[in-house]
Every structure is written in C-alpha cells, then in structure tokens.
Image (cartoon, grey):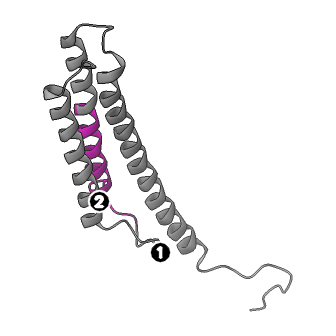
Amino acid sequence: MQTDLNSPAPSVDSADRRTQLAADRTVFAAERTYAAWVRTGLAGLASGVGAKKLLEGVVPEWMIWGTGSILVAFSAFCFGAAVWRQLFAGPPPPHPDTPRIPPALLIGVNGFLMLVAFSALVGIWFGRTGGN
C-alpha cells in the first residue's frame, strides 16, 4: 500500500494533546474561580469594617452593627466557599501538566482570612463607633 507524500502525516497524539490542554484550562478556570471568591470576600470584609466608621452619625447604632455584621459574615462565607469550591470542584480533569494549589495552603490562607473576618466581627460588635 502506498502513501501519498503530499498529504499531512496523521497526528496520533492530537486528541491526547487536546485533552491535555483542556485539563490545563480546567485547572486554570478553577483557580480563577477561587480567586474570585477570595476577592469578593476581601471586598465584603473591607466594606463591613468601613461601614462602622462611614455610617457613624448617619444611621442608628443598630443599623451600623447589623450592616457591618452581615458584610463581615458574608466575607467569612466567601472564604469558606473558595476552599470548598477549589477542593470539591467535581471530577478531576485527566492528568493536567499544571500543578494545582496544595490543599494545605488553601486551608491555611483561607483559615487565616476567616479568623480575620471573625476578629473584625468582634470589633464591630464590641468596638466603639463614636469619635470620642
């Protein structure tokens, strides 16, 4: 059987390579989702802490306490959801070349962020709101 010299050589590994690249894209997409959860949590934390000072003298004390508490509690939820979403994202992609973020690092960093969020919550509840 003769082969045509002008036709391109069949790429045996092309499907395997596309699968590999798809697995890498899946890892990167999961990391972007993780980063979005952390970014949202940090924004909620900053908003909750800022609400205490910003709303001073504008709205009643109970509203400052409630608004700050809700925002900081939401930030703690986001930090927890980031880890959960990264660790339990569904079936793993087929052997990506790209290394994943180590679970211990995820839990350590987000655990610290949750501790900061709960500390801010205590500060909102028991800290002074007034200027003097």
- Give the residue at mark 1: 97
Mark 1 or mark 2: whose residue is earlier in sequence: 1
Residue lying farthest to the front in this orientation: 132
Q: Position of residue 93 (x, y in %)?
A: 39, 64
Coordinates of residue 81 in the picture (x, y in percent): 27, 44
Q: Residue furthest right?
A: 6
Question: Do the residues bearing badges 1 and 2 touch, measured as CB atoms within 8 Å?
Answer: no
Find residue 11 and report its horizontal and vertical position in percent: 66, 79
Residue labelled with disc 2: 106
Picture quarter with the N terminus = bottom right
Across and down, in percent, residue 70 comes to: 23, 25
- From the viewer's side, name the closer residue of 123 and 130: 130
Circle 2: element type: helix
Give the residue at x 20% y 19%. Answer: 65
- Distance between the Cα atoms at labels 1 and 2? 20 Å
**Neighbourhood count class around disc 2 (C-alpha, 10 Å): few under 14, some 14–19, many 20 upward:** some
Q: Residue flagged by tag 2: what amino acid is it?
A: Leu
**Magenta stretch: includes residue 91:** yes
Name the one closer to the observer, 74 or 24: 74
In the drawing, does residue 19 fall left or right of residue 69?
right
Residue 39, placed above or below residue 46 = below
Residue range highlighted in magenta: 73-93
